[in-house]
Image (cartoon, rainbow, N blue to C red):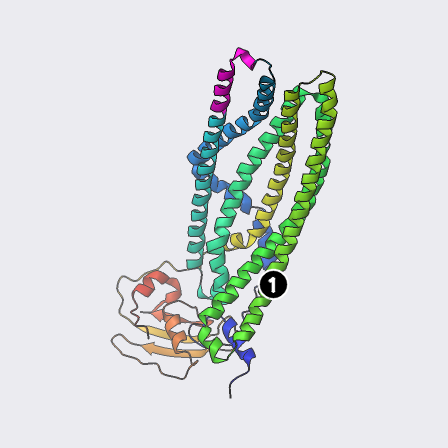
């Protein structure tokens, strides 16, 4: 008679225990310690990422220079369009230029802006890729330096997601926030200054958009940051479940549990869809409100500005320039608000990644032996796996292997054969007692050195 299917779910979620089968779910980490670690890391993770950009000074400088050039050319664009309209309507070209000379200056300005855009896109894009590569290397190094017990409480699929997805997303988000924030701030401040030089009266009309945009951005920031964290954690859970089930596809088919696994996966998948739907709805409402505010502001500018054109205070070209600058200012301030929202969202969604990056390496001895004779002794060794602390696999084991002896350890499955081999190579540590090599406790020996002294033939 086959065991119930609940056994299958336990089997698939059981942590690796060094070869001993165990249908026991992982033991969760201490919630209080985890929350303290999250609070500590959340205050420093963005600063740590920003510090990585210091190692990319040259491409970062080139990217910022290109961004400055592109932003400056963008600010000149409305002025050029206004002058172009005036010149086309019969007015003389500015600066005493001929019409052909004016066209040449305009094309040169556009070309300069395109060069700046290329430098910004390429250089800052490479900065993001290099930061992502450094994050992946550091995270992989941290994962390799952890003890086996570390993996008992974590799904490998989730760790792979942090390594493959979160590192890239975090690096891209930080660089995007820097570049978009800088560009938006330039647009907002620069366009505001240009508006004041054209018409202070119209400037007051166009500024009515700011309170609406600011309030909407703050509300959107708080809501979207929470949803981003939930979404990223849900994706990591889905990846972990899918990888574990597919790695154990033989067991799934043995118990004819395909439909059960599909239902379980679909439940997680629907959770991701719900979070995504909420996020898209919030973003849609924010963008819709932003569009309404900008259009109302632009209508007010054109309506009031039309009266100024009729009175002779402004030309049609100047009003066109003002309308474009008004749009630049609105988009600039909304961009700054969005960048602040993205920065907060990035900080919250990257907490899991930085909790992993902050893990210290496993404690290890530094000692070695000048010559190895091969005298191994187990002195009152007891051992229980972290997932089953109340069940001793080994209970006060005393065993001695002299140099030159050939010893075979036999026993039924789960008796502790693999555990003994793992203890000898320091893959796991005894709960109590000591394992010695030539009279030296292996706890004081360097694990890498010790394992190089042991020959292993896999089954």
Q: Is residue 454 left or right of residue 75?
A: left
Residue at the image point whose x is 47% and y is 26% from the top? 112
Q: Is residue 442 left or right of residue 268?
A: left
Residue 309: x %, y % from top left: 71, 19
Q: Where 157 falls versus 11 (above or below)?
A: above
Residue 376: x %, y % from top left: 33, 73
Quadrant (top left, top right, bottom left, bottom right) of the C terminus = bottom left
Residue at the image point whose x is 35% and y is 81% from the top? 409
Q: Nearer the viewer, residue 124 or 449?
A: 124
Number of marks in picture: 1
Residue 395: x %, y % from top left: 46, 79
The answer to if 326 sits in the magenta stretch is: no
**Residue tagged by mark 1?**
270
Residue 360 appearing in the image: no
Q: Where 367 falls versus 315 (above or below)?
A: below
Q: Nearer the viewer, residue 453 or 9?
A: 9
Q: Is residue 383 left or right of residue 318?
A: left
The answer to if 101 sits in the magenta stretch is: yes
Q: What residue range appears in magenta?
A: 93-109
Q: Nearer the viewer, residue 30 or 337?
A: 337
Q: Where 176 falls versus 5 (above or below)?
A: above
Majority SS type along the magenta span? helix
Residue 254: x %, y % from top left: 47, 80
């Amino acid at each position: 008679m086959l065991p119930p299917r609940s056994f299958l779910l336990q089997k698939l979620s059981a942590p690796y225990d060094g070869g001993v089968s165990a249908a026991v779910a992982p033991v969760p980490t201490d919630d209080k310690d985890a929350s303290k670690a999250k609070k500590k890391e959340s205050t420093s993770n963005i600063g740590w990422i920003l510090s990585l950009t210091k190692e990319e000074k040259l491409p970062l400088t080139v990217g910022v220079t290109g961004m400055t050039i592109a932003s400056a050319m963008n600010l000149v664009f409305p002025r050029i369009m206004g002058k172009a309209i005036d010149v086309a309507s019969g007015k003389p070209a500015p600066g005493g230029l001929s019409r052909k000379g004016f066209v040449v200056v305009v094309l040169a300005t556009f070309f300069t802006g395109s060069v700046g855009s290329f430098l910004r896109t390429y250089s800052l894009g490479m900065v993001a890729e290099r930061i992502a590569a450094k994050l992946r290397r550091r995270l992989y190094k941290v994962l390799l330096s952890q003890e086996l017990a570390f993996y008992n409480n974590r799904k490998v699929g989730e760790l792979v997601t942090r390594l493959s997805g979160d590192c890239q997303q975090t690096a891209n988000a930080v660089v995007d926030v820097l570049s978009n924030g800088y560009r938006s701030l330039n647009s907002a401040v620069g366009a505001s200054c240009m508006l004041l030089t054209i018409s202070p009266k119209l400037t007051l009309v166009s500024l009515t958009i700011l309170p609406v945009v600011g309030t909407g951005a703050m509300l959107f920031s708080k809501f979207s940051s929470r949803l981003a964290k939930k979404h990223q954690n849900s994706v990591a859970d889905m990846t972990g479940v899918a990888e574990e089930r597919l790695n154990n596809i033989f067991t799934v088919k043995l118990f004819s549990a395909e439909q059960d696994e599909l239902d379980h996966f679909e439940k997680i998948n629907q959770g991701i869809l719900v979070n995504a739907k909420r996020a898209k709805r919030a973003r849609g409402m924010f963008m819709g409100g932003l569009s309404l505010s900008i259009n109302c502001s632009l209508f007010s500018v054109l309506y009031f500005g039309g009266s100024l054109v009729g009175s002779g205070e402004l030309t049609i070209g100047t009003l066109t320039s003002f309308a474009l600058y008004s749009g630049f200012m609105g988009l600039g301030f909304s961009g700054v608000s969005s960048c602040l929202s993205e920065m907060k969202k990035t900080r919250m969604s990257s907490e899991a990644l930085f909790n992993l990056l902050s893990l210290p390496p496993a404690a290890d001895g530094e000692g070695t032996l000048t010559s190895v004779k091969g005298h191994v002794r187990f002195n009152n060794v007891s051992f229980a796996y972290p997932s089953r602390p109340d069940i001793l696999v080994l209970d006060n084991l005393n065993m001695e292997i002299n140099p030159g002896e050939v010893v075979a350890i036999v026993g039924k499955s789960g008796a502790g054969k693999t555990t003994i081999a793992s203890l000898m190579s320091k893959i796991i540590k005894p709960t109590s007692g000591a394992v010695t090599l030539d009279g030296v406790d292996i706890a004081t020996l360097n694990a890498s050195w010790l394992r190089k002294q042991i020959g292993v033939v896999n089954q």
